[in-house]
Image (cartoon, grey):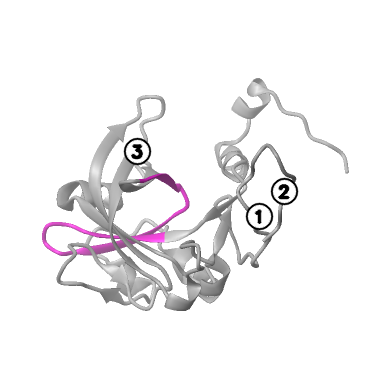
Amino acid sequence: MTAESLFATDIASMAPQMRALLINSLPGYKSGMLVGTCDTKDQPNLAIVSSHFHLGSSPPLLAMILRPSTGNSERHTLNNLLETQCWTLNGFTLDQAAQAHQTSAPYPKNQSEFATCDFRAEWLPEFGAPFVEHSPLQVGCVLREHHPLSINGTHMIIGEVHYLRYPHAAQRSDGGLSLDAMDLVAVSGLDTYTQPDAGLRFAPADTTSPPRQL
């Protein structure tokens, strides 16, 4: 296979869409989730993200990177969660990938992606943002920190996990979740959806023994 070598000047000279697709592919496979938010008038919004990541377990923190509003589109997710201080993360399966992908379209604020993209909103009395009904993994987050990033205008949002729901059978005896048991989707770049299998598991690494597969 012939290798492609690019330097900074080559990357900078690429067409914007081609560069975006290339750079978004570099982190490899990422977890795809649907972010549920609403404004202070309970107007719901749903958007796909693959930029969220684990930040810590005590307290349980998840972070994500959101883009700012531009001349071409508004960022309802960012505005909503800053207003209400909470949001949900919802896993989806491969047969829902087309619907999930469609939530990235620039719908106006008064048009809910839940209804437009054929997802049903689930509201819990104890939480102020909508979940995706029947999502195999539901996570409710409360805003802890917001960091605008001057390097490119994006925003780092840090949330503390205040609610979790997942199938009992998906939790391993060590506490971790078997994501393949929930048929959760992974995302590559901006447009490719796949479903990983169970993969390989290993015991914690140490300096006195070779890797031990579980």
Residue 185: in magenta span? no
Quick one: label 2 or label 3, which is nearer the N terminus? 3
Residue 74's tag is none
User: Residue at label 3?
Assistant: 156
Q: Nearer the viewer, mark 2 or mark 3?
A: 2
* Residue at image coords 79%, 34%: 4
Q: Return the residue nearer the eye: 204 or 64.
A: 204
**Mark-to-mark CA distance, 2 and 3:** 35 Å
- Which amino acid, mark 1? Phe
Element on which disc 3 rests: strand
Element on which disc 2 rests: loop
User: Residue at label 2?
Assistant: 211
The percent coordinates of residue 21 (x first, y second) are 59, 45
Furthest-top residue in this view? 9
Assess disc 1: are there few (<14), some (14-19) or many (≥20) residues with their C-alpha within 10 Å of its C-alpha. few
Assess disc 2: are there few (<14), some (14-19) or many (≥20) residues with their C-alpha within 10 Å of its C-alpha. few
* Residue at image coords 22%, 62%: 129
Quick check: 111 left or right of 177?
Answer: left
Numbered range of the magenta stretch: 34-57
The percent coordinates of residue 90 (x first, y second) are 38, 65
**Mark-to-mark CA distance, 2 and 1:** 7 Å
Q: Return the residue nearer the eye: 201 or 92.
A: 201
Secondary structure mainly formed by the magenta segment? strand
Furthest-front residue in this view? 208
